[in-house]
Each structure stands twice: as structure tokens, then as C-alpha cells.
Amino acid sequence: MALLEVSGLRKVYRLRNGARRRANLVATDDISIEIERGQTLALVGESGSGKTTVGRCVLRLEEPTAGDVRIDDQDVTGLPPRALRELRGTMQMVFQDPLDSLNPRHTVGDLVSEPLLMHGIVDRRGLRAELERLFGIVGLGPQHIDRYPHQLSGGQQQRVGIARALAPRPKLIVLDEPTSALDVSVQAQIINLLRAIQREQELAFLFISHDLAVVSVLADRVAVMYLGQIVEISSREVVLSRPAHPYTRALMEAIPVEHPSARRTRVATMRGEPISPIDPPPHCHLVSRCPFAKPICSEVPAELVEVTPGHATRCVRFQREHENGSWNPTP
């Protein structure tokens, strides 16, 4: 059984459009994912695709509109507030901007102490020793414990964020673009740190990112999101080397080559305007921009269908042509 099981997750924000009409902004729709212990699932896609909303709904930092979330076979979505607080230690989050996620009025030692005391991991007599252990795991020394966030570098601040997430001894950590605000050299250090911690503690990661280079290093499986939906999901190797969905292929095409003379297979460029996330239609959300679109793409609902074992895509044309062996990856 998977550690994290998400089924049919949907988040809708109710808007008032004009004086009378109400509209629905669909942030995430029909999200179903699983993560095994010790594995990483990466959610990738452009800004506004709903990646962070998925992570926040999984942890119930935002209330999902519909769907089920289970962690270690415990129902997260149906828990009352008190029971949810008790479960918080099982699931933690590392935020994108480390400085914004750390209270500047407290030392970083105090910030990491809070979950330790709240979840009864240690008492005050053993607090200092546990802080030194946690800070050591993330590559910080005892001298950092009594410093304030602004006295640390960006990389050190993110290490504190990771230490705070590790404090209650979780089973799942949601990583919301944890390296995007850091220098490239520091990014590599944080990624190596996360990989080492995952191996040692058998943690499950939900890794939210738009950086496919980082995803290629850290992820076991990759789910590609576009306008609130997962449009393709499979192993890292399949998604990054043999993508089926046109949007995934466009993302891969956008990765800079190492040298201007490098050659790569070109796909047609995405053109046109994206559809609105307000009351979106049931058909393919990419149809207005997709160079592969056919009339059928606007006529039938776009569902996530497994085309080969472990590989699912939300492309009607690919699904139909894959079935009869006529798929031709040209517009």
C-alpha cells in the first residue's frame, strides 16, 4: 500500500462575476496520485498550473472541494481539527522562500523547537541535544541555533526549514520549489542533502517544481500539470525521454541545450491563448494552443488514461491513435 494516496482531488474557488452571476475558478481537478515510502513524485508545470494548490490540499493547509487524501491509510480529508493536529507530525512542508517562512522575531532554534515540543518528541531537558542533532543532519553547527533568520544565508535558511520539517519525524514532506530562490551552487547542495535524508529516513517526497533539470535528479515518478489537471504521469525516464502529451513535449523542448550547436528533435511551438480556468470545458484544456489538435479534441471529455503500464496521458488524439498503432508525432 502506498504511503500517500490521493483520489479525485478538486479545489474550486467561488467567484462573483458581475452583480449576479457566480463563477467557479477551478484550481485543481481530478488529481489522483500515489507515493510509496522512500520515493519522490514530482509535480511539474508552468506557474498557475495548480501544483502548489495540490500540495496545500494534501496537507489540508487548504480545504479541498472534493476528493480523498489518505496518508499511511489514514483519511486526512475527513479528520476533525483536533485529530488533524495530531496527524500533522506525519506530514510536513518545506516552502519556496526560506526567509518568508521563518518568523524573524525568533531564533531559528526556537522555530525548530516548536514542533518538537508540540508533538512531544522531546521535553525541555533534551531539547538542546535534539536541536544539535537536527542541525547536524542538515549541515548546520550548534552555533547556528541561537541566530536569527536574517543572520543566515539563503542556503542556511532553507536548511533550517528542512530541519523544522524533519523535527516531528514525518513520513511525507511536500517540497514546494525548495531550491528556486537559491543560487545554482547552493541548489545542488540542497538537492544532495534531500537525497541523503530520504535514503536514511525512507521519507516520501511530493516535489513541486518547474525545473526539469532538478526533477531529473530527484524524482522517481513525474506528473505534468496544465491548468489544474495532470496531463501525463509516468516514471521519470518515460516522461523526460519519451513524453506522449504535447504539453510535456513542449516543456522538454523549452529546456536550454548545453551548446548552441546541439541538435534536438523539434516539435511545433505552442501558439494561441490558454483557456480560462474559470468554468473550464470538459474537453482538452490545451486544445486552443496544441499544434496536434483535431476536431475530436474539442468534442469528447479529456480523461487521464493509462496507455502503457504505469504511463497515463490526457490526450484524446494520442489515446485513439496509440490504440490502432497510427500515432504520428507531427502536427
Image (spheres, grey):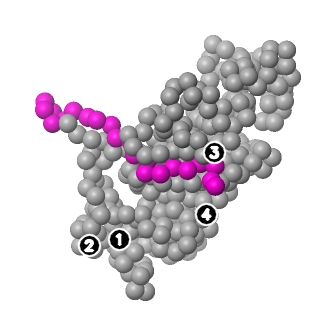
Q: Which residue was labeled with disc 1?
A: 316
69 in relation to 238, above or below: above
Which secondary structure lies at badge 2?
helix
Q: Amino acid at mark 1?
A: Val
Give the residue drawn at x 38%, y 81%: 321
Give percent across and percent down for residue 89.
66, 32
Give the residues drawn in magenta, as a range. 1-21
Q: Is residue 207 visible?
A: no
Work out whether residue 144 or residue 269 is closer to the camera in this orientation and state it.
144
Q: Nearer the viewer, residue 82 or 265?
A: 82
State the image quarter where residue 15 is shown. top left
The picture quadrant where one finds residue 106 is top right
Q: Does label 3 or label 4 sit earlier along the sequence?
A: 3
Q: CA distance from mark 1 to mark 2?
A: 8 Å
Seen in the image, is 215 located left or right of residue 318?
Answer: right
Residue, disc 3: 72
Q: Quadrant of the C terminus?
A: bottom left
